[in-house]
Image: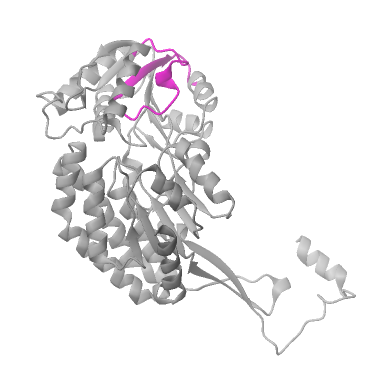
Amino acid sequence: MIETLVCEQRAFFASGKTRNLEFRREALIKLRDSLQKWEKPLCDALRIDLHKSYEEAFMTEIGLVHGEISDALKHLGRWARRRKVRTPLTGMPSSSYIIREPLGCTLIMSPWNYPVQLLLSPLVGAISAGCTAILKPSPYVPDVSDVLRQMIEDCFPEEYVAVVQGNRDVNRALLAQRYDLVFFTGSPALGRIVMESQAKYLTPLVLELGGKSPCIVDKDADLRIAARRIVWGKCLNSGQTCIAPDYLFLHEDIKDAFVEAFKQELSGLYPGGTENSEHYVHIVSDKAFARLSSYLKDGEVIAGGHSNPETRWFEPTLLDNVSPDAPVMQEEIFGPIFPILTFSERSEVVDFVTSREKPLAFYYFGNKADAWNILARTTSGGACINDVIMHIANSNMPFGGVGNSGMGSYHSERSFLAFSHERAVLCTPTWIDLKFRYMPYGMFKLVKKMLAG
């Protein structure tokens, strides 16, 4: 079945229909209209699978996809047009061009934490570029995945865009096929499996992974603002966000004050607590809940720590006296637990962060000049100064990882480029044929001077 589907999509791409700009525009409009039509079923499903409120579902999922579609419809003509570029003197009288052409048949694999946004935002890039797409949603959010299947089937023929559902066996069957691009969002461990599966085909990849994103609070930070934004960022989707602040690195002078500010701001955001809040997401599965619970023994709980396995509610938790070698400091937490480390000099932060895998995000609260200094000595997929998460909301900036946290980037025009090949074309006239390039290389001294600058 999967092999047949790939063949059908290859045949549809080969027909040339997806290369037509008007076809792409109409497909984007269909996707936009379908997203509006299926908004309530999607939000209802997100509530069932993740206990996600309508407001959070729209802000972090559906609204972002609408923004990507709007951007693509507005700029598609400019993104896709042929570009003339400068030709050096040695290439005269030729003209040089870049044409952006679709890669072809693509596979988009999305995770469960933002199942709508992380499946459909890459799809906008695929449609804009002129590709076909096989979509693989996560089985861990079955209601959302089924609504997405119905929505896509209602919108597109499967030889153009199709949804394939299933577990690891289906993943293996999908990854056994050859594609022109695989776009994968998930953990670094699964990213390695995807990369290995496509290595034999030399398939280009976009890997949006994760990692332990540090959150540094320096001694001159505005603690009230820092605490409020950090609480919000950690509680968003209950910490089940690839760019969630993963662990706190607090200057020792402000540690106690920050902990108190954290507690106060948490109470401000959830005055009735998080357990019965309409706006607090629950943990996705029993397995994930058990993993988070196991981390509580890696330190001293100084705030939170309560949970309910029946509803998979897990309270935002501060964990003190944590060893850098503890399990909670090895893998991305992906939940509302905050291990606390302290520092006295910024060089300690730099040494610690650079000694580990490159994170997807880096957050610093404090003086802006100090922030730029510490950013210059570290690396990450993206970063915020005196904020968290919000860099993902600006489509004018790339979103992607580096090293263990991913490869490639997307959003807006970069989504278009992720699914495109920039083809170089040289157009040379025949009315003149300069002899210096031919053997025996006459005028070599002049050519050498031109090439060497």
Q: At 32% from the left edge and 45% from the top edge, which residue is drawn?
A: 138
Where does the C terminus fall, quadrant-wise? bottom right
In the image, which residues are magenta? 320-346
Q: At 12% from the left edge and 30% from the top edge, which residue is drawn?
A: 277
Q: Is residue 37 left or right of residue 339?
A: left
Q: How many marks?
A: 0
User: Is 329 in front, or is 202?
Assistant: 202
User: Is 190 in front, or is 43?
Assistant: 190
Q: At 87% from the left edge and 74% from the top edge, which residue is drawn?
A: 441
- Asked if the stretch drawn in magenta spans residue 259, the answer is no
Where does the N terminus fall, quadrant-wise? bottom left
Percent from the top left, x then y, of residue 394? 34, 49
Q: Quadrant of residue 437?
A: bottom right
Q: Quadrant of residue 419?
A: bottom left
Instruction: List the single residue furthest toward the front.
Output: 1
Percent from the top left, x then y, of residue 320? 34, 12
Percent from the top left, x then y, of residue 316? 24, 22
Above or below, comparing residue 252 to residue 230 in the picture: above
Does residue 258 appear anywhere in the picture? no
Above or below, comparing residue 162 to residue 309 in the picture: below
Above or below, comparing residue 85 to residue 109 in the picture: below
